[in-house]
Image (spheres, rainbow, N blue to C red):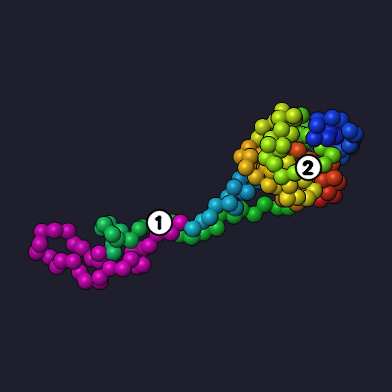
Amino acid sequence: MTVVDVYNLQREKVSEVELKEEIFNVPIKGHVLHQVVAAQLAAKRAGTASTKTRSEVKASGRKLWRQKGTGRARVGTAASPTRRGGGVAFGPKPRKYEVKVPKKVKKAALKMALTDKLQSEQLIVVDAFTLPEIKTKNFVEVMKTFDVRKALIVAKEVGETLDKSSRNVPWVKVMSYKGLNVYDILKYDQLFLEEGVIPKIEEALI
């Protein structure tokens, strides 16, 4: 078991918590993390790009000029991809970019990302991320107390006070433990975990 300190929002140590080795101390494999992150980013793509082929372009079917005798090249429909205003040859069509990743690989990657944060001393455990009132200034002061920028905060429940206080801070993201993912863990420099979140994460990943 790995033991880490638990802090309050004033950065005062209030207790300690044990982290399970099979989740927070696993071998880190770069290719597994890359596979999962690439799949996440691919799933975010809209895939709505679309062009019209020569059969979809609205154009007259009349032959533009006669086949022989003009000294010009033979020509067919005005919808030909070689003509201005014509269709597009091999253009994009709506598609899905999703890449299926096995559940075991996703779980393994999540364990690796959590292990990386712990080993690089970028994991901060707090007893509870509760603020007295909805005020961005108070939230920023807490971040300054911990001397962090670009942080991911994972709470058991994202209350209205925390949500609205952090909403206008572009370098911080707040989410419920249910949405925890590899991309966000690696994207942000520091990872805040509420103490009550840790058993939930361990239960989901074992």
Q: Which residue is mark 1?
A: 91
Residue 9 sits inside the magenta stretch:
no
| Side (left or right) of 118 relative to 51 | right
In the rendered structure, the answer to whether residue 52 lies left or right of residue 190 reads left
Q: Position of residue 201 (x, y in %)?
A: 81, 47
Instruction: Please say if 57 is above or below 25.
Output: below
Crowd class of label 1 (few under 14; some 14 to 19; many from 20; radius 10 Å): few
- Residue receiving disc 2: 132
Q: Residue at x 14, y 68 (%)?
A: 66
Q: Amino acid at mark 1?
A: Gly
Q: Is residue 36 visible?
A: yes
Q: Position of residue 179 (x, y in %)?
A: 72, 50
Q: Which is nearer the N-term, disc 2 or disc 1?
A: 1
Extent of the magenta region: 49-78
Along the line of sight, the residue nearer the viewer: 194 or 131: 131
Query: Is residue 52 one of those drawn in magenta?
Result: yes
Q: Nearer the viewer, mark 2 or mark 1?
A: 2
Vertical arrangement, residue 200 with respect to residue 50, above or below: above
Front-most of 114 and 89? 114
Q: Identify the mark at residue 156; answer none if there is no mark.
A: none
Q: Secondary structure at mark 2?
A: loop
Residue drawn at x 77%, y 42% as measured from the top left: 131
Identified by mark 2, the residue type is Pro
Position of residue 46 measured from the top left corner of the image (x, y, whole percent): 53, 55
- Answer with the quarter of the image where residue 155 lies: top right
Residue count near mark 2 (Cα–Cα under 10 Å), binned few <14, some 14–19, many ≥20: few
Q: Residue at x 82, y 37 (%)?
A: 126
Looking at the rendered image, the quarter that the N terminus falls into is top right
